[in-house]
Amino acid sequence: MILKIAVAAVVATGMLLGAVGAKAAEELTGELAALYYHKKSGDPLDVAGAAAGAKPVTTASHFDRPEAQKAEEARLRAAQAKVDDSTPLVVLTNVTLGEYDRSAGQYTINDLLPGHYLSQIVFGRTYKIGFSNGAPVPLPLPMEEARKVDRQRVIAQVEGHFVGVGDPNGKLDSRYTVLVAISKVTLKLADNGKVLAEFTPSAAAPVPSAKAAADFDVSGLKVGMTEGQLTAAAKASFTDKNLVMGSDQACGGGSTMTVLTKPAVGTVCVTFKVANGKATSITVRQVLTYTKTVVDDVRKGLIAKYGPPGAAASQRFFGWGQSVGKRPQDFQLYAALDAVQTSMEYDAGESGTPVLSVTLTDAATLQAKAAPTQPQNGAPHL
């Protein structure tokens, strides 16, 4: 279940372009995106490390390098202090025309849809720039002009502003991703800058709030329940499923690779940990039917139930609630969609069977996971 996500290549402009509102627009570079991300996400930027790799520092003489390092650090801090949601932005990107629709008399450009992104490498990492209100961009042209344009390179000048980090739809990885609200798209010929069309997308729909941690449940099962309550809740939720309590072997045993026996579609496995008679952690694994849309269907279903994820990765791993880290599995509520395969399926290159695992952990148990472990005394006892 490998997904392809369209990536639009960023065209370097080398200058600031136009103006949006009262301020001159800033070129949306990888550096600007990175500075905004680390300002908004709570994941601080290693300013000294970022400055050390900058050209003014690496090209400085050994004698001048300390001063160059100090100046670059000051420049980065000043730029980060300046950037915010009100900063007007502009960027040029290549776009793909696709096939001309003769009945509608237009091309439709899909490079700015939600889930598509611009990619920039800076400070040794790849940062993604997604669009909160991305939409298909129409390019209406008479047929003869369309025939000429079809052989030329078209670029989009995208104007907008930052609106946050991560992706509330879970389509993009939450780490190192920023979102931009588009205010205007101008389509141009790359060779001479001739304007072909302008487009203003609608505003993005309001992002709903994530569900409160106290309201989390996994198919009706909650931490704090007794074993008897968990069993009763599971039987009530999965009346039409093959329910297995206390073991996940029938659901692949939690494996994300190969299994000996193909798990039966419709099987549900519930495992849990209990302390003082109360559940502190619950995992529900469901064996699903493989379809071409299973990844998208599961993502949409999870977000409809729990709200925007606090972390997401690969459109298949999500986290909500309290966390002890940045990865989806570091969160109080963690959902993962994996494919388990038998050896024969693996050898044949088949997709395998999708298994959705959702784990809910109480806050105290989650925090205990993050507690540093005491180093083992490795000295010999003589």
Image: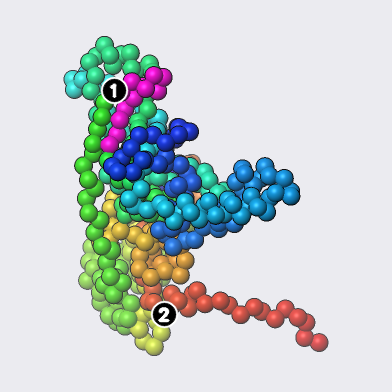
Instruction: Judge from the rendering whether residue 295 lies leftward or rightward of residue 70; answer left or right.
Output: left
Q: What's the colour scheme?
A: rainbow
Task: Give the camera-side residue of 276 and 27.
Answer: 27
Looking at the rendering, the stretch of residues picked out in magenta corresponds to 184-195
Is residue 218 depicted above or below 346 in this figure?
below
Q: Residue at x 59, y 52 (%)?
A: 71
Is residue 239 depicted above or below 277 in this figure?
above
Give the crowd class for mark 1: few <14, some 14-19, many >=20 residues within 10 Å: some
Measured as percent of width and height from the top left, residue 126 is found at 50, 46
Q: Is residue 5 visible?
A: no
Amino acid carrying label 1: it is Leu
Identify the secondary structure beneath mark 1.
Answer: strand
- The answer to which image quadrant residue 263 occupies is bottom left
Real-space Cα separation, disc 1 to disc 2, in angstroms: 59 Å
Give the crowd class for mark 2: few <14, some 14-19, many >=20 residues within 10 Å: few
Let me know if residue 193 is in the magenta part.
yes
- The answer to which image quadrant residue 18 occupies is top left
N-terminal of the pair, mark 1 or mark 2, is: 1
Amino acid carrying label 2: it is Ala
- The answer to which image quadrant residue 357 occupies is bottom left
Q: Residue at x 62, y 44 (%)?
A: 56
Residue identifier under label 1: 196
The residue most toward the left is 103
What number is the disc on residue 364? Answer: 2
Is residue 287 depicted above or below 279 in this figure?
above
Q: Residue at x 58, y 77 (%)?
A: 373
Instruction: Judge from the rendering whether residue 228 lies leftward or rightward of residue 153; answer left or right.
Output: left
Let me know if residue 299 is in the magenta part.
no
Label 1–label 2 contact, CB within 8 A: no
Task: Give the camera-side residue of 102 and 380.
Answer: 102
Measured as percent of width and height from the top left, residue 180 is found at 34, 46
